[in-house]
Amino acid sequence: MSSIPTLVSHPSIQAILAAFHQMSDQVIDLAIAVQQIPAPTFAEAARAAFIEQRFTAVHLQDVAQDELHNVYGRLPSSSPTHPPVIISAHSDTVFPLETDLTVRRDGRYIYGPGIADNSTGVAGIVTLARVLREAALPLPADIWFVANVGEEGLGDLRGMRAVVKRFGGEATYLVVEGGLYGQISHQGIGVRRFKLTVQTPGGHSWGNFGARSAVHELARIIVAVDRLAVPKTPKTTFNVGIIEGGTSINTIAQSASGLLDLRSESLVELEGLVTAVSQIVEQANKRKDVRVRMELIGNRPAGQLAVNVPLVQWAIAALQAVGCADPRLIASSTDANVPLSEGYTAVCIGLAESHHAHRLDEYLDPQHLPNGLGQLLLLTLAATGY
């Protein structure tokens, strides 16, 4: 097995690394083509069909979709002596079907909902598949390229759960994001998501003034959550991202609901936060004419790969080899959570820099995209045992 510096010294690999600098516009064009196909979580079929066509066009083998619309393609080893390497990029976005996906450019920046997260990630793995097939390197392991569903929103990593169930613990997992260049996520933070549903008698805003309102009661719960003290280290967070309820402006609401996201780098802190919210709900249920239900709707498992594990060290060395002087090790919530939670070998890396993720004014800075593809190439080769 070659070290990263040894890999970089190979003329054939040097040629690929140099070629990435000539491919940037092609990769961006492909990312835009992906981005133009709406793919909200649970509605990824159209984008999956496009990705399946691209996998076929670059001559991967065993190209197919599963029942979830995960798309798979294999670059076979001529003489496999190592377990497979799984390179994945999620295909879904946070944006609804009706979102205006117009792309605009401002200097080197490219604006468009989902352009980085994760259209650039998908374009990157398709590009790597094509380059590796054309280079015909004697790989000692099969490489599976996967565009998986269900990473965003309430997808609860369902696509990646299926991927990991298929390939198991012998495989190495490289999760690719369009942004995050210069960062290596080797720790998956724990996430719990709940739907809070409040029921009250309600009534007319004038005639029944003073009756319990589900909207008002939900607001009290949110304020109580907002007052909770959480540590900065280990980082622990809460957020109510959506609230719904009520009938009209002059109706005392009978029902209201909110979606609550709880996260922490520490499972102990996360469980403590869940307990604190549960106690708030319990107190709310003690109020007359108030019924609150706290329903678990998402559970992203936590896990961690030690810094001294070869895959993490290769990821650091690969970034340094392509010119990133100060790689950052981070904790985050990505598809890598699933294999990490099972004790499997996995990291998440990024291809370029991006800003305003999950916003309509999201934009990609492709300045480092060639280097991001270079680090992915080097890490892939090291993981295959090349």
Image (cartoon, rainbow, N blue to C red):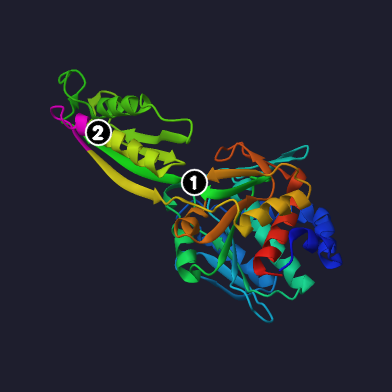
Q: Which three-letter amino acid code belongs to the residue tagged 1?
A: Pro
Relative side of 43 to 286, left or right: right
Asked whether 110 or 174 is in front, the reply is: 174
For image coordinates 60% across by 36% down, the residue present is 356
- Tag 1 near tag 2, CB within 8 Å: no
What is the x, y in percent for residue 193? 37, 44
Picture quadrant of residue 206: top left
Looking at the rendered structure, which numbered label has been put on residue 96? 1
For image coordinates 81% across by 64% down, the residue present is 13
Q: Is residue 287 magenta?
A: yes
| Residue at far front of view | 308
Q: Reply above or below: 142 against 195.
A: below
Relative side of 204 to 158, left or right: left
Looking at the rendered structure, which numbered label has been put on residue 121? none
> Dot 1, crowdedness within 10 Å: few (<14), some or many (≥20)?
few
Relative side of 249 to 29, left or right: left
For image coordinates 36% across by 39% down, the residue present is 259
> Dot 2, crowdedness within 10 Å: few (<14), some or many (≥20)?
few
Q: Reply above or below: 66 against 94.
A: below
Q: In front: mark 1 or mark 2?
A: 2
What is the x, y in percent for residue 120? 66, 52
What is the x, y in percent for residue 171? 55, 68
First in sequence, mark 1 or 2: give its number.
1
Q: Is residue 189 visible?
A: yes
Residue that label 2 marks: 279
Q: Is residue 185 magenta?
A: no
What is the x, y in percent for residue 198? 24, 35
| Residue at far bottom of view | 79
- Residue range highlighted in magenta: 281-292
Q: CA distance from mark 1 to mark 2?
A: 34 Å
Asked whether 242 or 223 is in front, the reply is: 223
